[in-house]
Image (spheres, helix red, strand yellow):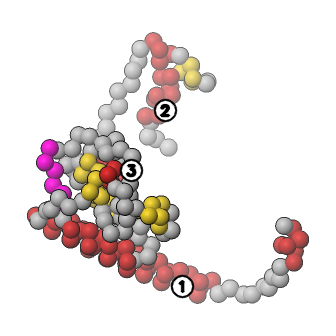
Amino acid sequence: MQEYFESLIFEKSPIDGKAVVERLQNSLNIKFKSLEAALRDLKQAVESSIDNTEATFDPCCELSDVEYNSRFRTELNLDKACIRVGKFADEKPIHLSLSVLEVMKRNYETTPYIKWQYFGSEQGIFTVYPSTSVSTCTEYDHRYRPWYVEAATPEPKSLVIVIDKSGSMNEHYGSKTLMQVAIDASDNSP
């Protein structure tokens, strides 16, 4: 390996830092604008779909027509979206319409850095494009995932922390008591 490295020819060339930064800025600007447009289109499709729903998506756990995709590095189906219904989903949840799938497909085709697109409803339906097979139907509930919780409750909250003060909290964990560990964990000061 060292011999190969030493056999390579290196050439010093000046770098125009300002030009590099401008190219990077333009590249990121284009990328973010296209992602913003894709999100805006998807948001609009979901909002329209809520008033005009169709139960059209197969459960992800029942898919069989998937094939390997190098962009995602897994087996999936680019023609479909699928759903996962949470264990505690509403009895008659609202499903998205095919128009949402069409926007997701268009986003995938026109924006090369977009991969998974999904929508999680408060009623317990998780729609994902492209569809991918999962082993179980009800083990996953997106409403307990950090991305959903943060989106559903973006405002800061007041928080009350209750700490057990029974005798077992006097036991040591390393050099501290469990009580001190709990207090340290709940302290938000730097």
Q: Which residue is mark 3?
A: 134
Q: Nearer the viewer, mark 2 or mark 3?
A: 3
Q: Which residue is mark 1?
A: 23
Q: Nearer the viewer, mark 1 or mark 3?
A: 3
Q: Residue at x 44, y 64 (%)?
A: 67
Q: Residue at x 24, y 52 (%)?
A: 125
Q: Chief secondary structure of the magenta span?
A: loop
Amino acid carrying mark 2 in the image = Asp
- The mark nearer the N terminus, 2 or 3, is 3
- Compared to residue 71, the image places residue 125 above or below, namely above
- The mark nearer the N terminus, 1 or 3, is 1
Q: Point out the stretch of residues depicted in magenta.
A: 91-96
Q: Position of residue 158 (x, y in %)?
A: 29, 41
Q: Residues within 10 Å of mark 2 (few under 14, many from 20)?
A: few
- Compared to residue 93, the image places residue 106 above or below, namely below
Q: Which residue is mark 2?
A: 184
Question: Which of the image's four quarters has the N terminus?
Answer: bottom right
Q: Residues within 10 Å of mark 3 (few under 14, many from 20)?
A: some
Amino acid carrying mark 3 in the image = Val
